[in-house]
Amino acid sequence: MRPARAPDWRNLGVMLRSVLLVNALAALALLARNRSGEALPFDLLEMAARVEPPLILTLGLLYLLAPVFARLTVRGGWALVAAVALASTLAADALAGWDLPSGRDWPVREAVWALLAASAAMVYFTVQERALGPAIAQARLMALSARIRPHFLFNSLNAVLGIIRDDPRRAERALEELSDLFRVLMRENRDLVTLGEELALCRQYIELERLRLGERLDVQWQTDGCPPDAKVPPLMLQPLLENAVYHGVEPLAGRGEVRVSVQRAGGDLLVEIDNPLPPPGRAAGHGGGNRMALDNLRERLMLFFDLEAQLEAGERDGLYRVRIRFPYRSRA
């Protein structure tokens, strides 16, 4: 059995934590044997010269071998990391002047250190992901999702009630759409979903909002270049669209336009949602929830993509824009 989420050696956060962990262990070992404060700076430089080259080489090789690592068992993954760390250390020492063919002055101390550092890194990631990660992530995701549902349910039911007398057939279809939406919302939402599924959910939500706002709500979709199989956090776009409607369109006296753009940019996906800024006097009573949704999404992006995801939000050219960038990963 493997950890719930084994280290992704192509993840910037994993690589950064590995660098910090190995350097911290080396610094602690250096401080334990250092007896002179004056020599400490020179000892630190010597340590960096010995530790950084094999560490960088190890991370580079693990980056290339990440697909192989992902298919291994726990023991196989540990063995691969240890072997790569040992080989990188021996290679770095060979380049530094160790006589590899003769075998004289074998870098036994460096080899032992490489194995210990590799083991420490794997212990850290295993404890983080296997013992603490799933339980904490599941609890936080369920709590975050629960914060979204009441507002969405309130708005959607009000929309249906507004037309139930005038157009009962449309109200019936709206209730069916609402049922489909809440089937998605009631999931545990621990796993990534496809971008196609998320966009379909958003379109259903917008159709429900049009029951209340009619022609006042105009949504422009720019999604022709997006890969529908891309993995995204569940409920990534719907809360942002909800905020765009509630904070941007609803306070307006007339028509408001929301623009949704999803496109692939190299190895990343770029999502932008723009909505109008209401006049200051009409914005009263529509504050507070926008920041909660953004904090909510930022935390979930961190859970799924670590440091590789970015979220920016703010006013620009008379519009409020939310911009999200995260790595493209397909379901396959």
Image (tube, rainbow, N blue to C red):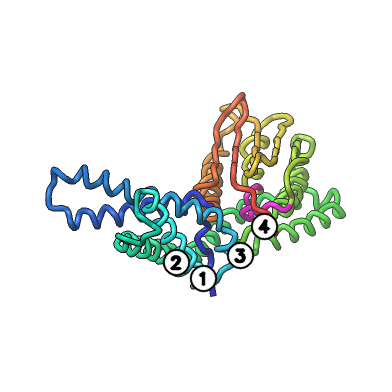
The C terminus lies in quadrant? bottom right
CB contact under 8 Å: marks 2 and 1? no
Sooner in the amino-acid sequence: mark 4 or mark 2: 2
CB contact under 8 Å: marks 2 and 3? no
Give the secondary structure at mark 2: helix
Give residue 126's mark.
2
Looking at the rendered image, the disc whose residue lies closer to the viewer, 2 or 1, is 1
Neighbor class of circle 4 (other Cα within 10 Å; few <14, some 14-19, many 20+) is some
Sooner in the amino-acid sequence: mark 2 or mark 3: 2
The location of residue 308, given as percent across then percent down, is 53, 47
Sooner in the amino-acid sequence: mark 3 or mark 4: 3
CB contact under 8 Å: marks 3 and 4? no
Q: Is the magenta stretch mostly helix, strand or loop?
A: loop
First to last magenta residue range: 229-237
Give the secondary structure at mark 1: helix
The location of residue 28, given as percent across then percent down, is 25, 56
Residue located farthest toward the top when viewing the structure as drawn: 317
CA gap between label 4 and label 2 equals 25 Å
